[in-house]
Image (cartoon, coloured by chain):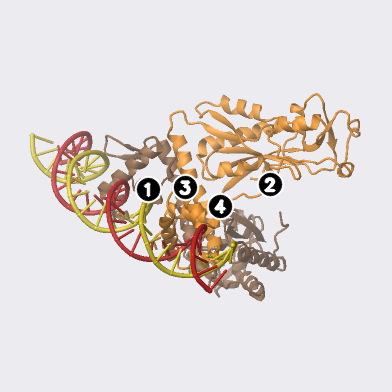
Chain colours: A brown, B orange, C yellow, D red
Amino acid sequence: MDAADVRELRYFVAVAEELHFGRAAERLGIAQPPLSRAIQRLERRMGGPLLERGGNRRVELTEAGLVLLHEARTALDAVAAATRRTRRAARPGAALVLAVKPGGDGGLLGAVLAAYEAEPGLAPVEISAARPGELPARVRDGRADLALAHLPLADARGLETEELLVEPQVAMLPRGHRLAGRERLSTADLADEPLPRWTPEPGAAPGGAPVADIGHLMHLVSVGRMIAVAPESVRAHAWGGVVCVPVTDASPTTLGVVWSAGSRSREVAAFVACAVRAAEHHPHAAPALTP
Amino acid sequence: MDAADVRELRYFVAVAEELHFGRAAERLGIAQPPLSRAIQRLERRMGGPLLERGGNRRVELTEAGLVLLHEARTALDAVAAATRRTRRAARPGAALVLAVKPGGDGGLLGAVLAAYEAEPGLAPVEISAARPGELPARVRDGRADLALAHLPLADARGLETEELLVEPQVAMLPRGHRLAGRERLSTADLADEPLPRWTPEPGAAPGGAPVADIGHLMHLVSVGRMIAVAPESVRAHAWGGVVCVPVTDASPTTLGVVWSAGSRSREVAAFVACAVRAAEHHPHAAPALTP
DNA sequence: AGCGTCCATACCCGCACGGTATCAACGGCC
DNA sequence: GGCCGTTGATACCGTGCGGGTATGGACGCT
């Protein structure tokens, strides 16, 4: 009952993603024959084929291969997280890494940091900017200890969360827009909009180029290239040429703290507690603390 | 930025648990010198000491070592789960393994299995008995795909859950007990009981020998050695000499399905759906489905 | 049919892991 | 306080495994 080696798992993931031994070997920086042997060894160890070397010159995943692809990814994340978090803890000035999406802190980050840094004897916090969809992955594989992200997460494997704010949504419109004078809007008003709408969640704009950060978005809105619906806290970053109008019937956005359940508990717990406390004094406090 | 090897993680966990190189080496089936070297290599890789080789002949964990111990355990669980789940999927008659605590199925298991097996084209289910506290660990490290357990879990890392039943609690009393004639009880009535009380959750009886399964418990109750408070569904297993009396103010027990978020989604999802459906037709349906 | 692509096999090499022997430091004991 | 036992570190050596190069074999394309 010998366990698999991480190297084999890495190799398998490469092959399963490329579906091509040569390219996978190149990506891994090794030659192709050792890769073939490693996969064969892995298949022997697993008791069955993982890849279908089709006669029609195509490599496809078997059912078991699909299982292993998923499992191996989480396992590799876990060992990567182990090394990264330990390295961070071993370094003398061990800092807590907080991943945020630029402009996506709900106007809360300053208060949270102030509360955290007021407590004595805790590691300093390092802010790390991340692409919107990348936040959970950062926490999962140990590149960050905590994240501020919008809930619910698409994939909450191995993560714990706590709600902080429930923010109503506003539409961001260029100043001259036909709806810019309105007191409030509904989603129906925006449904007629010919311009692409954009919500900050999915990481990439549905029909256009991905929007990297809040400044980029503001720019695009102010020049009339798009309109967007976003949590109310973006008002703090609104440019001169951009008008924010509440969208009354849009479902509110929930901002929360995310951390790995396997993290250094003392500092992470302190940060989460500070975040919750800071959020309670905020205009849009989350309704109730579940636990 | 080379990742750690699973072997090193296994070695480190052994040393961290034994706090003794010799015993750890013996447990690992290797000699002591290679183990010392492996730990040193790991420490070099992590950028700092993980163990404090005290001058007073004691090995202790550093802060970073404590972090790694925790992280390495979850990482090892993850790779073990990967191999186990893949092995299971590769075997032709790939069965879904469901872990239950004997007698802890809330009287629901039959209906769930019937509903699941009615669906065509799904893998068969294999029931695996587990000690009460062991259920989440079984799912986490891949020995089981699903479990029926009482919620909330003490440690939900990497697991997803769905509530099924909320059961009121009953006291199990020997027939001749002074409270056996009562229609209902409160916890205050039981507070005076000299006999040890026992709830099935924590895995070991507080003051006595651990109770292995529901039959064992029934036996102890029927001979007057203990009384117990348990979910109402244990009535189905009640022996002749045991009387069940509702405890009106005991907080109800929640039974749920537990599975790993990284599991084979199709079959696991089907089973969860069947379980939820079966639970809805049960006397004590859970109040609402959150998602 | 011939060539190119792509995975598998054969063979060789170097290194790293493991074993044995030994050292060094510390504690306990008489 | 000297001696021994314990325990982790070091030295040295062999071997097995992982990786590289060369080549084979099967299939598709033209």
Whether labels 2 and 3 share one chain: yes
What is the C-alpha distance between the residues marked 2 and 3? 25 Å
**CB-based contact (under 8 Å), mark 4 and mark 3:** no
The residue type indicated by label 4 comes to Gly
Chain letter belonging to callout 4? A
- B179 left or right, relative to B21: right
Chain letter belonging to callout 1? A
Earlier along the polypeptide chain: callout 4 or callout 1?
1
Foreground disc of the pair 2, 1: 1
The residue type indicated by label 2 comes to Pro
Identify the image quadrant of residue B173. Answer: top right
Residue labelled with disc 2: B152
Name the secondary structure under disc 4. loop
The numbered disc on residue B79 is 3
> In this orientation, which residue lies closer to the viewer: A275 or B247?
B247
Chain letter belonging to callout 3? B
What is the C-alpha distance between the residues marked 2 and 4? 16 Å
Q: Residue at x 63, y 55 (%)?
A: A250
